[in-house]
Image (cartoon, rainbow, N blue to C red):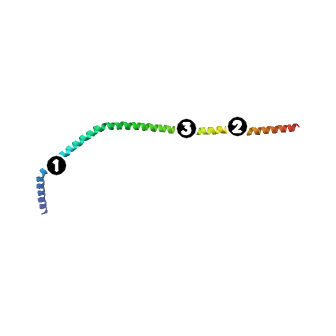
Amino acid sequence: MEWRSHLDQTKKYAETVKSNLPDVRMKLEKVSDEVSRALDKIQKKEAMLNKGMAGMTGNYKSTSSTLKQMTDEHNKIRAHIEEMEATFFEIEEELTKIQSSMDDIGKNISDQSPLLKIKKATEKVRKDIRAIDI
């Protein structure tokens, strides 16, 4: 019995769909036309924007590549400067060592205490010789 009620209900729905189909079809066609027109407008605007922005994107690309080249060159120069600074510090350290050794040599050269000791020793030897001669 239940299947009969389902069948009757299905027939009612089929009749409702058949009666509303032409009206709904027209409304859907109108919506489809409106959507198509809107898509056409969007495509035209997109094409216009692409034309207008073509020059800007070209400028951006060239500027971007120039920036990349300059950044690469900057990094190379920075690395070279760091190498030169390291060399400079090594040379400066070596120079400091040489200056300190030259200062030590200069002090030893100008240091007269060994010479004075030799003179005193020679005088003592002379006195001893004189004492022996007497």
Looking at the image, is mark 2 or mark 3 nearer the viewer? 2
Give the left or right position of residue 18, taking residue 85 as reference.
left
Dividing the picture into quadrants, the one containing residue 60 is: top left
- Which is nearer the eye, 63 or 130? 63
Q: Earlier in the sequence, mark 1 or mark 3?
A: 1
* Mark 3 nearby-residue class (10 Å; few <14, some 14–19, many ≥20): few
Q: Residue furthest right?
A: 134
Establish if 128 lies above or below 11.
above
Q: CA distance from mark 2 to mark 1?
A: 113 Å
Q: Which quarter of the rendering shows the C terminus?
A: top right
- Give amino acid for label 1: Leu
Q: Position of residue 43 (x, y in %)?
A: 24, 41
Horizontal and vertical percent position of residue 71 = 43, 38
> Going by the picture, which residue comes out furthest to the bottom?
1
Identify the secondary structure beneath mark 3.
helix
Q: Kindly identify which residue carries mark 3.
A: 88
Residue plotted at (82% across, 38% down): 125
- The local secondary structure at tag 1 comes to helix
Tell me, for residue 28, which label it has, or none.
1
Determine the residue positioned at 75% across, 37% down.
Answer: 115
Name the residue nearer the viewer: 18 or 80. 80
Marks 2/3 in contact by CB < 8 Å: the verdict is: no
Decide which of tag 2 and tag 3 comes sooner along the chain: 3
Amino acid carrying label 3: it is Phe
Q: Position of residue 22 (x, y in %)?
A: 12, 50
* Residue 56: percent from left, percent from top: 32, 38
Which label number is shown at residue 82? none
The answer to which of marks 2 and 1 sits earlier in the sequence is 1
Q: Which residue is mark 2?
A: 110
